[in-house]
Image (spheres, rainbow, N blue to C red):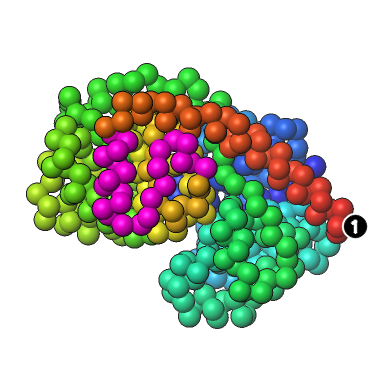
Amino acid sequence: MRILHVIGWLDFADGGPPIVTTHLAAAQADLGHDVTVAYYSSPVADQRTDAQLKSLPHWEKVKVHRLPPCSRLERLTGRSAGRALAQLVASVDVVHLHNVWEGILIRAAAEARRMHKPYLVIINGMLHPWSLAQSRWKKRIALLLSHHRMLDHAAMIHVLNEDEKQAILPLGIRAPSIVIPNGVMLEEIEPLPPRGEFLGRRPELNGRRFVLFLARLHYKKGLDYSADAFAILAPRLADVDLVVAGPDGGERENFQRRIAAAGLSGRVHLVGPIYGREKFSALVDADCFVLPSRQEGFSVAALEAMAASTPVILSQECNFPEAAVAGEIVPLNAPAVAAALERVLTNPNRRALGQGGRALVEARYTWKHIAGLTISAYEQAIKSAR
């Protein structure tokens, strides 16, 4: 099968969608399919992304089509990308669009409709009521002008969990929805780094246990809840620190103010974005992973923590109830997060929790398995289009 993935740009600093796009494409290519990924070039992001993709298994089997860097107007309209997209869409059997709001997706969908090629749209939580409430009027206008048509005429709307499927019903999108979650590429992380590798590079953590927050430092990710929960936890567990890893998404300064006000700056370590082996060495050494997010499609970081056999604490808004085998799913408030952290960190069998998470990932959430689900969806879409 010939498959085209279209995304605005690839920058792992943007979080989940670029990771999903590249890993899904690589897994599909490994299954023997002809896979192309098209996106706008960005000199700074490309250099950073290329360095990360060198270690992604099977990425060498994926064709990459970089469009010229886009202006702000091009980002909205996708007009200059039209000709290249027409040629790419004509050469494939199915198109998979990643995200919602970029103009390049509108153009790709229009070309697919013109050529009677089926396309899917993975919405990555962007049409969830919480997300639509951010920049509300801009998004409403965009839906009215063009984006609703893109969604209505899709062969399928690719949602990441059942909650997302139900949440978009009020929008009246005519295309059917299909639930396909995210995954982990185990061959990318095996063998896992040995325990102590991350701690060995961080003398400030010598002799300390730590909770790991690994995500963009963004309001959506609940970094403020992490700060407040740690302020509750810290007096109870004097040997535990908090490590915060990820690019700044606008919340770093607010987080640092909260921690300073609690008098905990010496026990909280902001290490910036970490990728590849360094990321997994942090996950392996962490005593617990925490993500009290306000809204998630399907957290890749949580899956990676489970793949590293690390216990997890997730908010209910992460929409991953199965992850309870690896830790706890809690209401979105600081006392609940703190109490769950204390229970896990004082649990003498917490390594068994981590092993339960690893077993779940192996059974249901590898990218190879997820790629197979998407191929079945594509076959159904192509059959319906014919």
Left or right: 127 as drawn, with respect to 255:
right
In depth, the one of 154 and 295 nearer the eye is 295
Secondary structure found at label 1? loop
Residue at x 57%, y 39% (from the top left corner): 183
Picture quadrant where residue 268 is located: top left
Point out residue 75 in the picture as x, y percentages from the top left corner: 53, 66
Give above or below for 145 relative to 198.
below
Left or right: 238 as drawn, with respect to 242:
left
Point out residue 216 in the picture as x, y percentages from the top left corner: 37, 51
The quadrant of the image that shows the C terminus is bottom right
Residue 8 visible in the current orientation: no
The quadrant of the image that shows the N terminus is top right
In depth, the one of 282 and 357 nearer the eye is 357
Picture quadrant where residue 200 is located: top left
Point out residue 22 in the picture as x, y percentages from the top left corner: 58, 42
Point out residue 185 in the picture as x, y percentages from the top left corner: 56, 32
Residue 347 is covered by the magenta coloring: no
Residue at x 57%, y 29% (from the top left corner): 362
Residue 345 visible in the current orientation: yes
Residue 342 is covered by the magenta coloring: yes
- Magenta segment: 322-345
Question: Callout 1: 10 Å neighbours few (<14), some, many (20+)?
Answer: few
In depth, the one of 323 and 157 nearer the eye is 323
Looking at the picture, which amino acid does disc 1 mark?
A: Arg
In depth, the one of 121 and 42 nearer the eye is 121
Residue at x 46%, y 67% (from the top left corner): 130
Provide the residue designation for mark 1. 386
